[in-house]
Every structure is written in structure tokens, then in C-alpha cells.
Image (tube, rainbow, N blue to C red):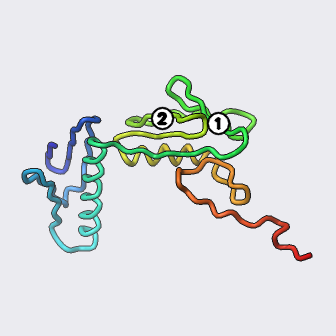
Amino acid sequence: MEIDGSTVMVKGSKGTLTQTFNSDISISKEGDVIKVTRPTDNRDHRALHGLTGALVANMVIGVSEGYRRTLELVGAGYRAQESDGNLVLQVGYSHTVEITPLPQTALSLEGNNRIHVDGINKQAVGELAARIRRVRRPNAYTGKGIRFAGEVIRLKPGKSAGRKA
């Protein structure tokens, strides 16, 4: 890990991340501990203090372990394929939808209805996973669509549920 003023560069087994932070917050390395300090107790400095600490921690975890988001395709005929490093989705539209991975991210498939987004940058992994989910959000009535693994969709009652006989 290298600190140059307000720029931090973290190297690890998975890669290298560099980020520039607000110059009001000071970042130092004391042995194996990264110390983030703020100049005053202003509200802005307190907010930047927490943000900077969390971002540095995310960088360290990213280059050492990496991040993974998993998405599931739920619906009859919904499937995903890989083609030239891109992801091709068939999710009920008249056409296929092609998704290109962002820098520092990788896409992999498990079967044809489970997508894994891997990378060292937590923000990029989350953004790509959100873009894929946005292609076909889960339907509130049937539950069909693209959802995060473990996401619980509360289904609404249909039209006939409100009627009384």
C-alpha cells in the first residue's frame, strides 16, 4: 500500500486499485494499520472520515479477496449465454440484450440462469449487477425477472384476490 498525499494505491494478489480522497482527511500507515484522521468535528469532516475509512477498507478487501454478486433469472424461457466476453440475455423480449462488462469486472455463468459478477472494485461490481437486473426487474405479481441471489420478492395479490364471492 502506498500513500501519496490524498491518493492511495493498494496492491494485492487480485490486482491494483488507486483512488484519490478529499485532502481534508489525512491517511497514514502505521505498521499494518491504516489510520484515517479528521481535522475537526464538523459534520462534513465526520462524514468524510467514515466514507474514507470505508472506501479504503473496500479497496483492501477487493485486492485481496475480491467481490462477487450473483443474479438469478426466474421465468420460463429466461436464459443467459456468454459470447466474446459479453453476456447475452433472453428474458422475454423480442430481441436479445447484450451486456458488456465494466473495467475491473468479469462475468461468469453457472448453468443458464445464474450469473456471477466478479471484480476487485466493489462499486463497479455493484453497478454492473444493477445494470443486469435493470434489464428485466422482478415482476411484483408473478415474480419473473432477474433478481439478486437471496432477494425476496413479496408478491402482490392478483385481481381476483380482492373479489368476494
Q: Are marks 2 and 1 in contact (CB under 8 Å)?
A: no
Q: Is residue 162 above or below residue 23?
A: below
**Which quadrant does the C terminus fall into?**
bottom right
From the image, tell me which residue sits under label 2: 107
**Which quadrant does the N terminus fall into?**
top left
Classed neighbour count for the residue bearing mark 2: other residues with Cα under 10 Å, few (<14), some (14–19), many (≥20): many
At x 24%, y 64%, the residue is 49
In this rendering, would 163 be left or right of 58?
right
Residue most extreme to the front = 111
Q: Nearer the viewer, residue 96 or 77?
A: 77
Classed neighbour count for the residue bearing mark 1: other residues with Cα under 10 Å, few (<14), some (14–19), many (≥20): some
Q: Count numbered badges in the picture.
A: 2
Disc 1 residue type (three-letter):
Arg
In this rendering, would 52 be left or right of 146?
left
Where residue 75 sits, quadrant-wise, is top right
Measure the C-alpha gap from mark 2 to mark 1: 14 Å
Q: What percent of the width, then of the height, locates residue 28?
A: 12, 54
- Which of the numbered marks, if any, corresponds to residue 79? 1
Q: Is residue 126 above or below residue 83?
A: below
At x 23%, y 38%, the residue is 12
Q: What percent of the width, then of the height, locates residue 53?
A: 24, 58
Q: What percent of the width, then of the height, locates residue 97?
A: 63, 35
SS at mark 2? strand
At x 40%, y 35%, the residue is 103
SS at mark 1? strand
Q: What percent of the width, then of the height, locates residue 41?
A: 20, 74
Disc 2 residue type (three-letter):
Leu
Q: Nearer the viewer, residue 59 or 49?
A: 59
Q: Is residue 54 above or below residue 160?
A: above
Q: Mark 1 or mark 2, which is nearer the start of the sequence? A: 1
